[in-house]
Every structure is written in C-alpha cells, then in structure tokens.
Image (spheres, rainbow, N blue to C red):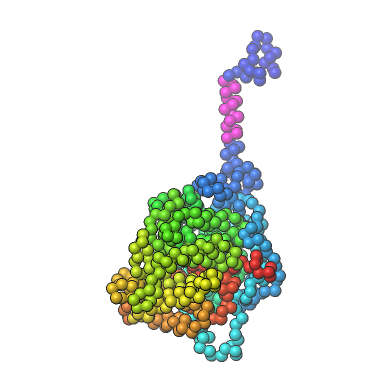
Amino acid sequence: MLMRKVPGFVPASPWGLRLPQKFLFLLFLSGLVTLCFGALFLLPHSSRLKRLFLAPRTQQPGLEMVAEISGHPRAHEQEPPPNPAPAAPAPGQHDLSSPGRRKGWLRRTRPTGHREEATALRPEEESVPFSFDFNAFRSRLRHPVLGTRASESEEPQSRVRAQREKIKEMMQFAWQSYKRYAMGKNELRPLTKDGYEGNMFGGLSGATVIDSLDTLYLMELKKEFQEAKAWVEESFHLNVSGEASLFEVNIRYIGGLLSAFYLTGEEVFRIKAIKLGEKLLPAFNTPTGIPKGVVSFKSGSWGWATAGSSSILAEFGSLHLEFLHLTELSGNQVFAEKVRNIRKVLRKIDKPFGLYPNFLSPVSGNWVQHHVSVGGLGDSFYEYLIKSWLMSAKTDMEAKNMYYEALEAIETYLLNVSPGGLTYIAEWRGGILDHKMGHLACFSGGMIALGAEDAKEEKRAHYRELAAQITKTCHESYARSDTKLGPEAFWFNSGREAVATHLSESYYILRPEVVESYMYLWRQTHDPIYREWGWEVVMALEKHCRTEAGFSGIQDVYNSTPNHDNKQQSFFLAETLKYLYLLFSEDDVLSLEDWVFNTEAHPLPVNHSDSSGRT
Ligand code: DMJ
C-alpha cells in the first residue's frame, strides 16, 4: 500500500485504515447489506429471486402458529393452480365419451410454489401447472348428470311433468325478480324491490347468484344460467376485507362454485372456489386447529374469533365435503389436512353418553357446554359424517363409524314419541330435554333415510321406519298451520303437539329441510305421499310467499293472511326449489349414486375412482 512507503508512518490496520476510517467503512458496508436485503422484500412476488430466497408464505401473518402446534404444513405453503380443463357440454348434453383415469383421490402430490393471498384473479394465477381431468371425471359417473329424460311423446302432459314445470317457473320467477331488483347483491328484498347485503359474507356479494348456478343448470334454464355465469366472470370479486362466517361462505359460495364446476367444467368456477378457499384458511389458526366461526378477510386473522370463546359444532363440522374437493381440484393438500385434523380432535375428545355437544373451545379443545341438538348448532355435523362416507365411495370408515355411533346416542337420549304418536328428536341440555324440534332438525328424516342402507343389517328397516316417522312429524308441523307451511320451531308439551307455542317461533323463512326429507324419502320408497306433501308446499308457497317481485318469508304461519318478511333467502333458490324439482324428477337426475348434496344442496361428486372398477 502507498502509505507503507512513507517513513515513520505506522499503519492503523493491515489495510492501512485509521480507526475513524475503519468505522466509516463498516458503516457503509452494513448500509449496503441492509439495502440489498430490503430490496429483496420489495421485489414483486413474481420475482424469481424472491422465490429462491424466501420460504413460501412466510409473510402470511399467524399461519406459522398452527403449523407449529398441530404439526401441519403452513397454510398456502403448497400452491394451487389451475390449468384449463375442457369445458363441459351445455345443459342437457352429456359428453361421456372421453375415457380417463384418475387414481388416488386426494393422494396426488402437486407442484409447490408460492403465490399471493387471493384477491381478484389475475392472469398469472391461472397458469400454475395443475390439471384436473374433467372428462375423466365425467366418464366415471354412473348416470348422465341430468338423467335419461323421458321425451315429451313418452310423457305427454303428465301430471308430474306439469308439476316439475311449475317448480321450474317458480325458479325462473325468483331468479328474474332477483336479477331485476338486486343483481349482484346477496339477496333480494321483494317488498322494497331492492337488494340486501347482510353481514355474513365479509363483503362478498352475489350469494344468490352463486347459490342459484346449479339449480338453473339442473332445470335447464340456459339463458338464466348464462346470466349468472357472466356475473361470476365479470363481477364476482374476491378482494374484500370484511369479517365473514366461515360456515356460510363455505356452504354457499365454495359449495356453489364447486358444484357449478363439476356440472359444467368451466374453469372460472374452479379457480374462484380455490382462491376463496385460501382466504378461509386463517380461521384454522388456533391452538387446536378447530376453526373459529368468523374469519377476517382483511387481516387474515380470526377476526371476531378473539371475542368469543367457542366454535359451533355444525359450523366446524360442515367443512369436510367442500374442503376435500378443494384439495381434489387444486392439488393443495392443506385443505384436506385442515378438516382431517378436525375429525381427529373430535375422535379423541370424550363425548358425554356418546353425544356431541354444540360448543367446543378451539383453544382448549374441550366442550364448552352440554347442549346437544340435531337442529340448529348441531345439524349438519351429523349430515357431513354420513355424506363423507358416501362421498368417499364408502371407504371413509371413520366417518361411517362416527355417524352410526352418534345416531345411536341420539336415539337413546333424544328420541321421543309424543302421546299423540308423533316421533321427534328433542334437544338435550345436560340431561334435561327440551321437547321441541326446530325446522332445521327436519333434515334428519332425509339423513336417516340416506344412511339406512349402510347400517347393520338388523338396523336397516328400523332406520327406514324412523326416517319415515320423523318426516311425518315434520309434515304435521306444516299441516297443523293455517298456511300449510311450518314454523321455525314446534313443541310437544301441555297437550299441544307439533305446533309453535310463541309468535317468535311461528315464522317461516322459505327453509328447505322438510322438502329435503320428502325428496330423500321419495327416492328411497317411491311412496306417492311424499310427492303429495311436496305439492302441498308448492301450493302454499305460491299462495302465501309469492309476491309481485319475488318470494318472501312470512312472519306467522298460523295467520292465513301473513305478513311478509321482505326477504328472498338465497337458500330458497339453492335448496328449497332444487329439492322440490328433484322430488318430481326421475331418480337418475343427479343420481344419489353419483352425487352427495352439501348442506346448501350443492351437488358434489362421489369419488368412484377407488372402488368402481370402471376407472
Ligand atoms: C341453509 O343455509 C343450510 O341448509 C344450512 O345447513 C342450514 N340453514 C339453511 C337453510 O335453512
């Protein structure tokens, strides 16, 4: 170095720097390193450099915790990714020609990668390599989706055809009214002729559109289906930031989009279902992995979750069907892992008398109170057990065992027969019974019928009869009202049976559960009574719920000129009208061999790949 040549000069360091110079140099160096490292974080997500250096999803707040506690991989760690699958035939056409194979339902691994939190879809999100073989899936169905329809000449002017057409007309009217006054809003208010958003969906819009897609398709309302699809393509945005019910978004939006995809093969439905599913994952970020009921789309946290202390059985117990399909369609195992963990927690926990209480702490994993119900708060948990068994093509033995064990406990502790001979399922509060049934509990007739065939030989006839008796009781709750529509809840005490005892329980909000049971019982027995009862409902809806601008719930079923509640619920189009239509259709229309209905009546396919021998 130059300085060494100056006589008498003693270098301050081997590089010839004095202490202040050395300090300045180090300062400069550390500034440079910080700058480079910082720039790495500021690069766009698509940057290859960033993907190389950063572990996937480390910037997603809170997700690490669940990974650590429950041993799960971090949410979003594996990225979904959509590749175009061939579009399906239009409604009415059935392309079953393409042979295809798909092995290992949910066992496939998929390419890993990283992508941003879902907001609105961007072109690059559609190009991640993952393919779902839609034609292969369709080739494995045992029946054409819309059945083998009798032609007009074979079924001329038949009563059942006319009944089906009437229900189709009701759907068309409900849709057109919604479209005219509330398109894009969550639900229609038919009296005020405007739309309603509510606060359940975290800022998502168009609940009625998504809930209607498969019903419109099923009824071959082609123009209306295209209107709904166009709205999803152009106006259904996921970049919302509110607080949403995990359950409601799952059963209505995810369920509706999944069904629409499986029915049509249209990629837009698959992609939006997956991206929306990703937005739900932070709800599982709890010590046990049991999700809280509400997720904040803004912060990606539990949202309201911190305020409450318990999660609801029917809510966290009604994710299994949709989440398995999210994994099936994305290749992302995280969805399936989340619901398998819920199952694991429920398997392990002590159950009082074999019963499942309605509230569970997602923090401690303990029951919060001992209230058991097959109606609200508990209902669809039981439904998803038997449907998980059926959807797995009867391979999910765990779900099967849990279902029949739970049903046995319900029968032992909750089932009753009234002095008048009506069979009902009461509610249980730590051993004390409330002798009432909610309208919601009336789905159980259909569920028990659906599960009867796979029960132990000696129980099958018994369950068929039990299903028929419960359905009859629910019909009584309709028959004993002035409007021939059923109340929200009905009691069996003080000599009164199957009637509401308070005005506050006398309303009817277009709910589907009773006609849902008629549909299952019809398919099982072909007893004409179920079509008769279903037709009574159609007539009552027309008389009391149809208004100039759509259908509305009513405030008092015991008043022959009831007030309307000014709401056309989205589940009326998703469920009530769909089940009515199926009740008057052939059994091979959305055959129960091929499909299970989620709790919002959205059909999801049975996995035939492992068991059919046709794959
Ligand atoms: C629907 O959203 C679903 O059926 C849910 O499981 C219960 N409640 C409504 C219909 O009543």
Relative to residue 304, is residue 251 drawn left or right? right
Specify the principal SS of the magenta part: helix
Establish if 445 lies above or below 65: below
- Position of the C terminus, as image quadrant, is bottom right
Give the residue at x 66% y 53%.
111
Q: Residue 382: where, in percent of width, then height?
A: 48, 65
Nearer to us in this view, 491 or 289: 491
Establish if 291 lies above or below 33: below
Q: Residue 133: where, in percent of width, then height?
A: 67, 65
Nearer to us in this view, 134 or 72: 72
Q: Residue 102: where, in percent of width, then height?
A: 68, 64
* Image region (quadrant) for ligand 1: bottom left
Q: Residue 50: where, in percent of width, then height?
A: 62, 44
Give the residue at x 56% y 81%.
586
Instruction: Answer whether residue 296 is magenta in the image.
Output: no
Give the residue at x 40% y 67%.
414
In this picture, which residue range is highlighted in magenta? 20-34
**Residue located farthest toward the top when viewing the structure as drawn:** 8
Relative to residue 445, is residue 107 drawn left or right? right
Instruction: Answer whether residue 33 is magenta in the image.
Output: yes
**Residue located farthest toward the left when viewing the structure as drawn:** 494
Give the residue at x 59% y 59%.
327
Residue 471 shows in this picture: no
Q: Quadrant of residue 34?
A: top right
Residue 167 shows in this picture: yes
Nearer to us in this view, 41 or 412: 412
